[in-house]
Image: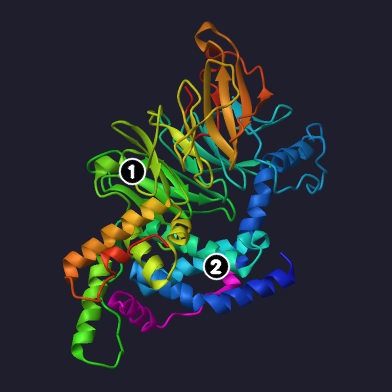
């Protein structure tokens, strides 16, 4: 049987003249992506090394050559980082003074973007902090795409709030208006060249190359439930728990995940739900991935690559026990300690930050 | 990437782009958006090229990138500025008006489908992929493909009627 459906689809498609794809642009962009991916593994090490050289070489990491070429590897996950005061720690044995005391910060493929206690936003690259904008100092929320140089925040200092997007690769920034008529605007993430923003229009994505705005969810209520987006995969919270799938508010249910905060791995294969107990899920099946952790409090807060999760943990934090930072790999669940004595949560309060773009309190 | 890799990739782009653009166009219904989709998907393929062992896997990789990105981009049909026009392209098919009218009506019916149903139907009945290949391209389970195709065809049938030969018969919507 000859189906008209098939015939007509062929006729429709063949009636259109397409421009040939731009091969040069593909190769240029692709090469840049490959270079960025390689630099992700180095971003902490090379940046710290650059400052260390300025400071006299005392902080040169072992194994890294001063020319920055020794440690280049596509296999290494990004380093675990944290900030106390104005000091950025890169792994257990490297640190650098960023300048401003940090209230929140994020990592990109090119460096770090941070907000200080006055609400000033700084771009930190190559050993220097450069003032790049303003954010609400009470809620200094930042987002980034750690595969590119993009970071974003909402500037509330102007009469009308605007989303600012900085590209650390070339130092340029763009901005656009938000719709705060009904609800306060909130940045969800940057993914695949688009900023995901929740505002009076619901959840919208703004494609940075064109400025084109797409309504991602039909209703503002549904938009408010989206937690994270990676490669077209949405993590959302519903009335019965968290779900991950190709549609906001729909997909594979993650049993035992209820929180409003969580993070998808770079390809969307895994989801870490932030809460008091570690909860990592394989998003294809919904199966929980068990991490080899003994601590009573543990939360995975940042994916260092597709299969490596940075975890903040503590045993009985309410009793003043010291906190640790670890890396755990999935799906095997093996964990190793990066920093075993951060101090107690009470000691860290007010001057501690992880690269989540949020004020840790 | 080596010069040889780049040459192989360029050959792949030249050979496969027209077919990929046509499939992308059927998925999103807009020429410039389809071109952007293919450009972006081929860039991803270029990045992955060294680990793609043959053209078959490169084709599948690119198709998956197009499909998942199309579903993501076109999740909601309320584009502002980038919205497809919804108009039917010129259809220089010789023949009578009924045929053109069929084509227009089918196009509008396809456009009315949710993105995942539309992608599943394009992959199954335009690309002639098996359910397993379609599932791979959509990044979902075979069961999801079955349900998306069945739902899509039911909607097309509701809109276009049960004219014999227009749509695959329900009994033919089976695993292969």
Q: Is residue A19 magenta?
A: yes
* Location of residue A8 in the rendering, given as x and y in whole percent from the top left corner: 31, 79
Q: Do pointers 1 and 2 mark residues of a single chain?
A: no
Q: Which mark is residue A269?
A: none
Q: Is residue A336 left or right of residue A170?
A: right
Q: CA distance from mark 1 to mark 2?
A: 29 Å
Mark 2 Cα-neighbour bin, 10 Å: few <14, some 14–19, many ≥20 = some
For the N terminus of chain A, the image quarter is bottom left
Q: Is residue A350 magenta?
A: no
Identify the residue under disc 1.
A250
Tell me which chain the residue with mark 1 is part of: A
Q: Which mark is residue B59?
A: 2
The image quarter in which residue A241 lies: top left
Front-most of A117 and A352? Answer: A352
Q: Which residues are magenta?
A: A1-26
User: From what the image shows, is residue A120 above or below residue B52?
Assistant: above
Q: Residue at x 38, y 51 (%)?
A: B143
* Location of residue A325 in the rendering, given as x and y in whole percent from the top left corner: 62, 24
Front-most of A38 and A186? Answer: A38
Q: Residue at x 55, y 67 (%)?
A: B59
User: From what the image shows, is residue A24 above or below residue A349?
Assistant: below
User: From what the image shows, is residue A314 above or below residue A193?
Assistant: above
* Location of residue A59 in the rendering, given as x and y in whole percent from the top left corner: 78, 32
């Amino acid at each position: 049987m000859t189906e008209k459906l098939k015939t007509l689809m062929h006729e429709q498609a063949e009636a259109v003249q397409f421009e040939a794809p731009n091969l040069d642009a593909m190769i240029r962009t692709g090469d840049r992506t490959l270079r960025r991916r390689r630099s992700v593994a180095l971003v902490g090490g090379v940046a710290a090394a650059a400052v260390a050289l300025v400071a006299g070489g005392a902080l040169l990491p072992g194994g890294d050559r001063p020319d920055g070429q020794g440690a280049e590897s596509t296999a290494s996950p990004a380093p675990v980082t944290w900030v106390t005061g104005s000091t950025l720690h890169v792994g257990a044995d490297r640190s650098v003074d960023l300048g401003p005391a940090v209230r929140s910060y994020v990592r990109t493929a090119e460096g770090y973007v941070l907000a200080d206690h006055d609400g000033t936003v700084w771009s930190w690259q190559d050993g220097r902090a450069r003032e790049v904008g303003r954010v609400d100092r009470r809620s200094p929320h930042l987002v980034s795409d750690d595969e590119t140089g993009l970071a974003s925040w909402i500037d509330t200092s102007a009469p009308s709030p605007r989303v600012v997007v900085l590209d650390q690769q070339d130092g340029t920034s763009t901005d656009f208006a938000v719709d705060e008529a009904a609800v306060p605007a909130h940045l969800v993430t940057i993914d695949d060249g688009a900023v995901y923003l929740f505002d009076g229009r619901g959840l919208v994505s703004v494609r940075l190359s064109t400025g084109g705005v797409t309504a991602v969810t039909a209703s503002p209520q549904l938009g408010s439930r989206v937690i994270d987006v990676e490669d077209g995969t949405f993590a959302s919270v519903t009335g019965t728990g968290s779900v991950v799938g190709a549609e906001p508010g729909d997909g594979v249910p993650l049993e035992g995940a209820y929180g409003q905060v969580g993070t998808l791995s770079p390809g969307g294969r895994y989801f870490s739900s932030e809460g008091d107990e570690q909860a990592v899920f394989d998003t294809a099946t919904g199966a929980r991935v068990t991490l080899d952790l003994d601590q009573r409090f543990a939360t995975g807060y940042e994916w260092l690559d597709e299969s490596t999760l940075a975890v903040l943990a503590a045993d009985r934090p309410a009793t003043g026990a010291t906190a640790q930072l670890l890396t755990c790999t999935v799906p095997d669940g093996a964990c190793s300690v990066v920093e075993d004595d951060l101090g107690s949560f009470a000691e860290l309060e007010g001057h501690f930050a992880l690269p989540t773009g949020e004020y840790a309190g | 990437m080596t010069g040889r890799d780049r040459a192989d990739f360029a050959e792949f782009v030249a050979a496969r782009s027209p077919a990929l653009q046509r499939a992308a166009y059927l998925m999103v219904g807009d020429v410039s958006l389809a071109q952007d989709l293919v450009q972006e998907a081929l860039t991803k393929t270029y990045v992955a090229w060294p680990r793609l062992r043959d053209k078959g896997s490169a084709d599948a990789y690119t198709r998956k990138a197009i499909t998942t990105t199309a579903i993501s981009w076109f999740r909601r049909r309320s584009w502002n500025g980038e919205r497809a026009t919804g108009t039917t392209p010129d259809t220089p098919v010789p023949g009578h008006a009924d045929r053109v009218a069929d084509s227009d009506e089918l196009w509008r019916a396809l456009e009315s489908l949710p993105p995942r149903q539309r992608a599943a139907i394009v992959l199954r009945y335009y690309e002639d992929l098996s359910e397993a290949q379609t599932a791979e391209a959509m990044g979902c389970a075979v069961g999801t493909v079955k349900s998306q195709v069945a739902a899509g065809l039911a909607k097309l049938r509701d809109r276009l009627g049960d004219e014999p030969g227009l749509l695959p018969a329900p009994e033919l919507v089976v695993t292969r």
